[in-house]
Amino acid sequence: MATLVKLVQPPSLMAFTHQPWQQHQAKFGELLKFRLVNPIKTAAQSSSSTSSLEVSQIKENFSQALQGINRGVFGTTSGKKSEIQELVQQLESQNPTPDPTLNLHKVDGCWKLIYSTISIMGAKRTKLGLRDFITLGDLFQIIDVAESKAVNVIKFNVKGLNLLNGQLAIVASFNIDSKSRVTITYRESTITPDQLMNVFQKNYDLLLNIFNPEGWLELTYVDDEMRIGRDQKGNIFVLERSEEQICL
């Protein structure tokens, strides 16, 4: 009888549950690890995506703010100027290239000016004939990294000379001062064609004083399609990448 009791006695609870518990414990650990690590990765991806969306929205707001002000060259209201500068600062805070002079390939090529705090107003505008007689066209900057050279190209249209088209080209060299700053040195300038030079000859120094880039420039924002800089006078320049053949 004792033998029968021994045979039907249930196995030990520990013996029955030991192996399965280890397996469940291991699986639970793997699941816990996955749940801890995976959200962190997702959050990082989400943060990057959010940042990209923020920049896109700021650029859209910036583009809307520029409507009707002709790049700010002939002045704008103080309210509009403050609005634009706030958007510029927002972009600068999201700068994807904090060390642009170490990544000069990103600034190489042709750029078109879309906003500047440099303005041509009052007597300056009158002397240069930029009210009715002469129309200020596009302003481009061509950066040649291999030659450490920058060329500013300012387009003009003269209504009184059979719609004469011409341009002022200012050639300058640049040297790297820091990871975000360059010093620009004026080299030479030309106006073509000769008829346009005759129009500006009397006030040529005034024209150069406005568009000459000499001094230092801090590159505060650079991405594949937009560039922002600030000079030693506190002026802001915002440019967008353009096709090379349009600049020339």
Image (tube, rainbow, N blue to C red):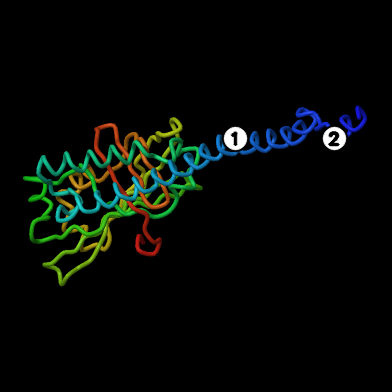
Q: Residue at x 61, y 35 (%)?
A: 33
Q: Single out the residue that lies furthest toward the bottom.
A: 162
Q: Which is more toward the observer, 213 or 138? A: 138
Residue on which the image places disc 1: 32
Residue on which the image places disc 2: 8
Query: Looking at the picture, how far across and down is residue 3, in whole percent?
Result: 93, 30
Residue type pointed to by label 2: Val
Q: Which is more toward the observer, 3 or 90? A: 3
Q: Which is more toward the observer, 30 or 24? A: 24
Q: Secondary structure at mark 2?
A: helix
Left or right of 5? Residue 245 is left
Q: Single out the residue that lies furthest toward the front.
A: 1
Residue 201 numbered mark, or none: none
Left or right of 87? Residue 93 is right
Upstream in sequence: badge 1 or badge 2: 2
Q: Quadrant of the C terminus?
A: bottom left
Q: Residue at x 87, y 30 (%)?
A: 5
Q: Residue at x 64, y 36 (%)?
A: 28
